[in-house]
Amino acid sequence: MREVIINLGRRTYRIAIGSGILDQAGALLARLPVGKKVLLVTNPTVAELYAARVENSLAQAGFSPFRAEIPDGEQYKTLQSAELLYNQAYDAGLDRSCPVVALGGGVVGDLAGFVAATYMRGVPFVQIPTTLLAQVDSSVGGKVAVNHPRGKNIIGAFYQPVLVLTDTDTLATLNGREVRSGLAEVIKYGVIRDSAFFTWLEQNINRVLALNPEALAHVVEVSCRVKAAVVEEDETEQGARAILNFGHTVGHAVESLTNYTGFNHGEAVAIGMAAASRLAVNLGLLKENAAKSIDLLLHSAGLPLRIPKHLNEQEMVEAMTRDKKSYGGEITFVLPQDIGEVVIMKNTPETEIKKAIKENQ
């Protein structure tokens, strides 16, 4: 079992990574000072595959799990879904010591985490991510949220889990699109902070796509270590943590303007990374060959690069202005200066943004 520690003082927690972690969930959770009633939040697809194993592990360790299922899909990450989970937590008799456990991908994790952060003003939260995207990104760092019709994740909090349990065996059941979606965030880590990892990905992308166990474990561990280092520097995104938003400025606009149904999160982020790289080249920050390397790796991972032509530049800019990552109405971009190095830019000229959008369609 591999382990990554997120050092945040009193909120420090561990990420356990390995094969067969699901069956150790109860024993690992029992090491923490939490109550015995557990709200296990999942969706029908994941529940059919893994819920019984987790429930059995929890029961063997003395816990009483109560399963709560939400429909699968970004469109269900809403306040309405949160209200349903509040009702189920109340009916199950959870008190402030009892954990909410998220078993699933990013939607389940974000929603369950939001409920954990707000139910009784906060109860313990455990992540058991089952998709590559969730294992390398959304389960790490404590961002929890629900969507609003006008924007993604604009209702939320910073709320750290007490434990993350990452079973790499669950990746074997993912379809190809879900694997590729997760790789967008993996590639992001190479661009923003780790050029050696970027090079490793260039050389091993086919092994990862083939779900080679050793390659997957390496991808998850390195990604978690990169994100952990950034989160430790800036837990609540006051400065350095914003580099994790590389690709997300354009990506969130693409998601919201296609009503969260045209692209999944990783695909939208890949489009956003390609657009941000093009913008960086136009502004003289990034060399053309580095931008081509980013595009090529994204393409090799089977990810989209182009903004849909029916989304015009003006509506894209307006969506980016409304995004929670903008400040004072100014669009904030994370732009690469080289592989492994990025800069945060807050006053990007609108004409340059529109130009990059047009060039990336």
Image: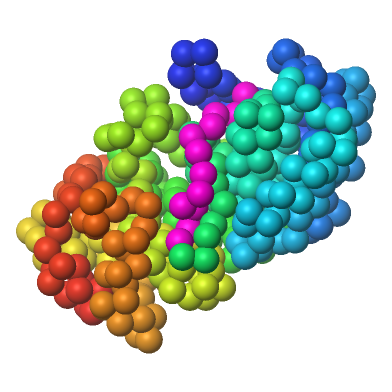
Q: Is residue 48 above or below residue 359?
A: above
Image point (81%, 57%), residue name: 44
Q: Quadrant of residue 213?
A: top right
Image point (35%, 85%), residue name: 309
Whether 206 is among the magenta residues is: no
Counting the numbered discs, the total is 0
| Residue 23 visible in the displayed image | no
Magenta stretch bounds: 151-163
| Residue 52 visible in the displayed image | yes
Where's residue 176, x and y in %?
A: 61, 64
Image point (46%, 39%), residue name: 223
Image point (37%, 71%), residue name: 305
Task: Give the residue at the far left of this rendering.
Answer: 284
Q: Quadrant of residue 249?
A: bottom left
Give the side of residue 201 with respect to residue 354, left or right: right
Work out whether residue 101 or residue 156 is closer to the camera in this orientation and state it.
Answer: 156
Give the side of residue 93 with respect to residue 234, left or right: right
Where's residue 62, x and y in %?
A: 90, 20
Q: Is residue 54 above or below residue 205?
A: above
Whether 159 is among the magenta residues is: yes
Colouring method of the image: rainbow
Where's residue 35, x and y in %?
A: 79, 19
Q: Main secondary structure of the magenta part?
A: strand
